[in-house]
Image (cartoon, rainbow, N blue to C red):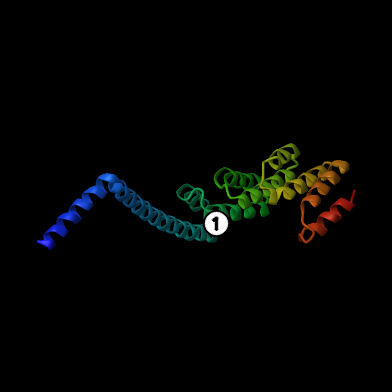
Amino acid sequence: MSAHHDEQQDIENAKHFWNKGGKWLFAGLVAAALGYLGHVVYQNHLQSKNENAALMAMKAQQSGDAAQLAALQQQFDGTAAAAQATLSAAAQAFDKGNYDEAAKAYRWVLAHQKDELFQAIAVQNLANVHLQQKQYDEALKVLATPLAAAFASLADEGRGDVFAAQGKGAEAKKAYQAALDKLGEDAPQREALQLKVAQF
């Protein structure tokens, strides 16, 4: 009789708990479990995607095939692997004097990769492409692209290079000095910038 009473009491307690908010606690636990499961599945998907992108990028870089690079860009838009392969292709095009092709690749990185480092690399190199083509206004427009504070000195140095190429010594010196002022005392590029400032 006592066991039956205890069992009935447990049932009543469970009903009371359920009606007083237990169902919401249960729903919260289920939601948390589903959220965690979704997070794990998403992370696994990202890892798989990044691994596939890296493999495809390696093949595209080794072959130098523009069609493979285009497929990589389309299938794995926004991945670091696609950005790295595109930057590599741009550098190769630049070295061969294919400036329009290089510019197109750097613009793709700017449009499709939001990582601050990749953005800074693309801005600096695209400006250099325009500088080689003597398209000074275009170079300055590119260098006006907002960059993270850690890379702001690169844009200033780029502006200095453009002004120097135009024979605008005062503007070049001012831009180089601005770049120098943004660098830490132990930055490896300080010496090169100091030499540029000293030219004017």
Q: Is 137 located above or below residue 9 in the figure?
A: above
Place of residue 70 in the rendered image (x, y in percent of width and height, measured from the top left): 50, 49
Place of residue 36 in the rendered image (x, y in percent of width and height, measured from the top left): 38, 55
Judging by the rendered image, the residue that carries numbered circle 1 is 64
Residue at 51% x, 52% y is: 79
Q: Name the kind of residue labelled 1 in the image.
A: Gly
Residue at 33% x, 52% y is: 29
Place of residue 92 in the rendered image (x, y in percent of width and height, measured from the top left): 63, 55
Q: Is 78 located above or below residue 50 in the figure?
A: above
Place of residue 55 in the rendered image (x, y in percent of width and height, measured from the top left): 47, 61
Secondary structure at badge 1 equals loop
Q: Nearer the viewer, residue 86 or 160?
A: 160
Q: Nearer the viewer, residue 82 or 103?
A: 82
Q: In this view, does 167 lie to the left or right of 183?
A: right
Q: Label 1: few (<14), some or many (≥20) within 10 Å? A: some
Q: Which residue is at the far left?
A: 1
Q: Is 49 located above or below residue 147 in the figure?
A: below
Q: Is residue 179 left or right of residue 57?
A: right
Q: Nearer the viewer, residue 41 or 23?
A: 23
